[in-house]
Image: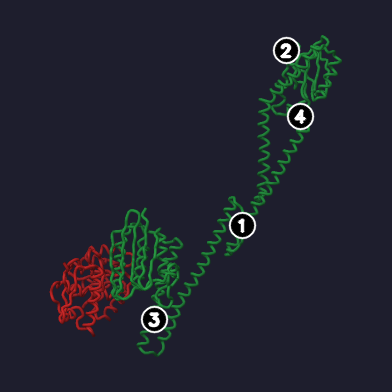
Chain colours: A green, B red
């Protein structure tokens, strides 16, 4: 069933149920409050009538005229003698059967409270019963004879013009709310079907579908979130395409070199040339191997599929270990390493974290000047652990500083054949994976400082 | 120099041997711990390179026996991420370790460094002023601050440190550090000494290398 039909059905059901509940409530009120009040009010009128007729000694004829006039004002009146003689004024009663209580009037009873005690059903409809038992009654003396005077308001008086206006009002309210709900449900379902088509488009990789929903309610919020999601997905999609482009380029160019130079090796060449070609092939193979390694780390962090194995890791020991494994490169460049390593423990994945240090210290070595320095510093307090790696290298220009964490960004494409531009983005991904942050500060030709901060819980 | 390489992986065994042989070392290959122990009984070696992961007796057990019975320097080959192995290794007085995959240059650097250290059978820790050298780990401490220096510079400083407050002839120094392999020995020594002086100054060392004109140097401890 469509949502709109469902709305209509529910609205009608709610109206029906409301009517039912309202009916029960009004019955209860009628039976317990209104009936009694009405009974007393009409009884007072009847007694007033009886009193006046008796006091002014009005004759039967004059009384009949008088009662006739009363009935025109909206009453049904009956004068009854004990022997059963009956005169009716106004609309005659349909049911004229006596009961014992009525008869009791002539045997010294004071008043007949028929409206209060009348029961042909528990429903409010009994109020309209055109029955002589559904009256109030009192004794009356006309021309020395005892009559019973029974009286009730006639049904016409219940349906005055004012009642008609009220009925019209209620009807209008009912119809217009149905129409309103119809309209509103249409608007809601329209927004939803709009969202449905947008989702459909998104499944087909179209992130441009314009969502024409301007609302401030929950559906509006949903639409806003949906637009945000569109934007984000579009960005990721573009990043992914760019990433794939870059990757395929970075795979292609070393492969091309390897193929080209290995073909050259087949030809008649001098041994020094051969060595040169061989060296190029080796370097390119290494590049490929590094690239796949780094890509693996990056994508596994991206997809959240990295088998996390977080534990307490001694950062100072890791830094020590990384420096140790790079000693020969440090030696080659004649670098001095200053180590100020206080015991620092963080809760982290040790394999991922060691990648961070390898990249940062590796860069510090790679981009350092000959006989330069690197200082590595770590310490911790209750709130955070800080690792600082400072080099005296070529530095990074200010305007490229914010780009260095981007994937495949290389400060100088020509200068650095080895790098893929992935190292620092791995560093950042791994650190953010550990809720840690990294900051970089650099002066051209003076050096660069990377500061990583791990919050402590 | 005779090196014994132990690894169950034939390819790595081959690769390590080729590079070492090209660098002028004599190499014996063993594919497991038992074979290695058999070789040790027959011949004498200067250095062992042992892979950690081996079927049967593993690298650590072998290293344990070797360091205790033969007093041989040992380099361990470990896979990446086996840091626990390394700590375990240090406790068993293993001299060095190399993480796989490694570069040829790294391997040669380590072999060379360890052999030099052993050949000179130098003391572990030497101190002068606020400068201290731990030759077991090739680590330098100045004013309670740890440094790693290029090997050559550290060797020169160590040489002078051992002879603190004594005149050292520049030719003795060149002979001991480089042998007779240098083209411009005096120039090379000068640049190294200058760099060492710079580094000492920056680190606020309380020692000073004083030039003795026409003869050599003397390392003095400042008041």
Which is nearer the N-term, disc 1 or disc 4?
A: 4
State whether residue B27 is above or below residue A112: below
The chain letter under disc 3 is A
Is label 3 in contact with label 2 (beta carbons under 8 Å)? no
Tell which tag, 1 or 4, sits nearer the viewer: 4
Asked whether disc 4 touches disc 2, contact meaning CB atoms under 8 Å apart, the reply is no
The answer to whether residue A179 is above or below residue A257 is above
Tell me the CA gap for discs 4 and 2: 30 Å
In the picture of the structure, the residue carrying the numbered disc 1 is A196
Residue designated by label 3: A280
**Front of the two marks 4 and 3:** 4
N-terminal label among 1 and 2: 2
From the viewer's perspective, is residue A357 above or below residue A310? below
Furthest toward the top, the residue is A144
Q: Are marks 4 and 3 on the same chain?
A: yes
Q: Residue drawn at (71%, 20%), measured in percent from left and top?
A: A40
**Mark 2 lies on residue:** A109
Q: Position of residue A289 (x, y in %)?
A: 40, 73
Closer-to-camera residue (B141/B77): B141
């Amino acid at each position: 069933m469509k949502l709109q039909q469902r709305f209509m059905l529910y609205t009608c059901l709610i109206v029906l149920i409301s009517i039912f509940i309202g009916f029960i409530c009004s019955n209860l009120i009628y039976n317990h409050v209104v009936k009694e009040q009405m009974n007393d009010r009409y009884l007072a009128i009847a007694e007033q009538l009886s009193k006046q007729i008796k006091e002014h000694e009005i004759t039967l004829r004059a009384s009949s005229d008088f009662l006739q006039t009363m009935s025109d004002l909206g009453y049904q009146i009956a004068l009854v003698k004990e022997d059963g003689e009956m005169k009716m004024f106004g609309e005659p009663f349909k049911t004229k059967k006596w009961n014992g209580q009525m008869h009791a009037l002539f045997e010294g009873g004071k008043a007949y409270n028929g409206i209060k005690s009348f029961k042909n059903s528990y429903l409010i409809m009994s109020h309209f019963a055109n029955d002589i038992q559904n009256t109030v009654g009192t004794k009356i003396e006309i021309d020395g004879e005892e009559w019973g005077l029974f009286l009730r308001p006639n049904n016409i008086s219940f349906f005055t013009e004012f009642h008609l206006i009220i009925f019209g009002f209620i009807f209008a309210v009912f119809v217009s709310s149905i129409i309103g709900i119809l309209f509103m449900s249409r608007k809601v379902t329209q927004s939803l079907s709009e969202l449905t088509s947008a989702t459909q488009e998104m499944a087909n990789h179209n992130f441009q579908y314009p969502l024409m929903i301007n609302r401030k309610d929950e559906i509006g919020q949903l639409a806003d979130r949906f637009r945000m999601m569109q934007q984000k997905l579009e960005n990721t999609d573009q990043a992914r395409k760019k990433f794939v482009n870059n990757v395929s380029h970075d795979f292609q160019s070393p492969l091309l070199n390897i193929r080209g130079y290995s073909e050259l090796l087949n030809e008649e060449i001098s041994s020094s040339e051969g060595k040169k070609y061989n060296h190029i092939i080796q370097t390119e193979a290494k590049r490929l191997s590094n690239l796949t390694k780094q890509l693996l780390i990056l994508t596994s962090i991206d997809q959240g599929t990295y088998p996390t194995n977080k534990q307490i890791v001694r950062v100072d020991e890791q830094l020590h270990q990384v420096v140790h494994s790079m000693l020969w490169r440090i030696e080659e460049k004649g670098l001095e390493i200053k180590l100020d390593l206080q015991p620092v423990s963080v809760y982290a994945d040790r394999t991922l974290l060691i990648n961070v240090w390898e990249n940062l210290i590796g860069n510090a070595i790679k981009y350092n000047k000959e006989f330069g320095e690197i200082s590595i510093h770590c310490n911790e307090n209750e709130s955070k652990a800080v690792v600082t790696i400072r080099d005296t290298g070529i530095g990074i220009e200010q305007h490229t500083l914010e780009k260095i964490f981007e994937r495949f960004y290389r400060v100088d494409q020509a200068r650095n054949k080895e790098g893929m531009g992935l190292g620092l983005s791995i560093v950042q991904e791994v650190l953010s994976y550990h809720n840690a942050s990294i900051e970089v500060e650099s002066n051209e030709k003076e050096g660069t400082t990377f500061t990583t901060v791990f919050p402590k819980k | 120099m005779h090196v014994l390489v132990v690894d169950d992986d034939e390819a790595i065994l081959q690769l390590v041997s080729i590079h070492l042989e090209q660098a002028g070392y004599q190499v014996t290959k063993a594919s497991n711990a038992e074979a290695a122990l058999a070789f040790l009984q027959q011949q004498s070696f200067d250095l062992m390179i042992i892979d950690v992961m081996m079927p049967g007796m593993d690298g650590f057990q072998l290293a344990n026996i070797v360091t205790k019975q033969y007093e041989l320097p040992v380099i361990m080959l470990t896979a990446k991420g086996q840091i626990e192995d390394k700590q375990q290794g240090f406790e068993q007085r293993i001299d060095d370790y190399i993480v796989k995959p490694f570069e040829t240059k790294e391997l040669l650097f380590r072999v060379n460094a360890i052999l030099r250290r052993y050949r000179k059978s130098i003391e572990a820790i030497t101190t002068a002023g606020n400068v201290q050298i731990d030759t077991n780990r090739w680590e330098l401490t100045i004013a309670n601050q740890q440094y790693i220096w290029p090997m050559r510079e550290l060797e020169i400083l160590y040489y002078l440190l051992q002879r603190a407050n004594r005149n050292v002839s520049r030719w003795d120094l060149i002979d001991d550090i480089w042998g007779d392999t240098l083209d411009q020995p005096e120039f090379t020594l000068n640049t190294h000494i200058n760099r060492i002086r710079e580094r000492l100054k920056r680190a606020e060392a309380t020692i000073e290398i004083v030039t003795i004109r026409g003869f050599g140097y003397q390392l003095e401890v400042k008041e």
